[in-house]
Image: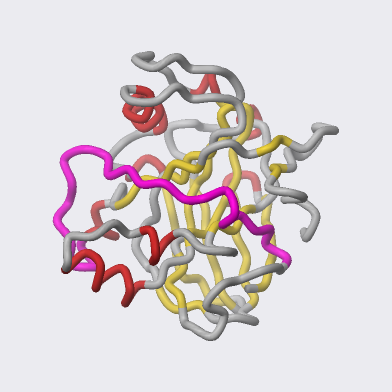
Amino acid sequence: MTDHLAPHSIHVIGQPLLVPVTNIYCIGRNYAEHARELGNAVPTEPILFLKSVSSLRALGGGDLAYEDETFHHEAELVLLVGQVVPRGSSVGWEVLQAVGLGIDLTRREVQTQLKAQGLPWTAAKSFAGSSLLSAFIEPSELPDYNSITFTFSVHGQLRQQGDTALMLNSVPALLTHIAKAHDLVPGDLVFTGTPAGVGPLRRGDAFTLEFTQIAKSFSGRL
């Protein structure tokens, strides 16, 4: 798995060329139960933040800032935009080239301190190795766009179960929301938010992400 982001590029299974990443958009609190487990209000519209391209890392290992810290894992469905979407467009699955699974590593104590001061989350969310990505698959492999299920396990123990049917904002709603203020371009990534069950992850921990409907899994190690 170590070659999927060489350099800062996405490997789509079955496609010969790597896809360079342009922008990384992330959605916070897109599952109500996750918002509640952290004591946050359930938002009425998508919470959008950005991560740097330099935060990308494959599942198999690599650079990791703050590697002596304990992070929180946030497993998510990740979208890869495949065409230009002009600002103001209403769009959906048709603009996606591929989908994958990712982990948004979070320095939770730092994030809590930043939120208390009304400051941006960048120091807690965007750092080397904080955006872990699987290989990607073409959307046509998914049996049901409205209910994509996935899991995240650490050392063989289930930690998170996601179902996009439970997202507060659907994939088309998220893409359209981002496009209100931005032109989407090929290579843009969208982390769609994490379900409940976030918890500690440390350097050396072994984990598995899986699209459960199609039994396609990706293993890695922090």
Residue 157 quadrant:
bottom right
Residue toward you, 196 or 108: 108
Residue toward you, 118 or 186: 118
How far across and down, in percent of the image, does residue 208 sit?
62, 65
Q: Residue at x 44, y 14 (%)?
A: 86
How far across and down, in percent of the image, does residue 68 sit?
54, 85
The image quadrant where one finds the N terminus is: bottom right
Q: Residue at x 41, y 32 (%)?
A: 171
How far across and down, in percent of the image, does residue 162 sit?
43, 53
Q: Residue at x 52, y 38 (%)?
A: 23
**Coloration mode:** secondary structure
Task: Give the vertical position of 14 relative to 42 (above or below).
Answer: above
Task: Give the vertical position of 74 relative to 149 (above or below).
Answer: below
Give the mark count.
0
Left or right, 123 with reference to 219: left
Q: Is residue 11 magenta?
A: no
Q: Residue at x 60, y 81 (%)?
A: 203
Residue 207 quadrant:
bottom right
The image quadrant where one finds the C terminus is: bottom right
Q: Which residues are magenta?
A: 36-60
Residue at the far bottom in the pictured view: 68
Residue toward you, 163 or 103: 103
How far across and down, in percent of the image, does residue 206 sit?
64, 76
Q: Is residue 50 magenta?
A: yes
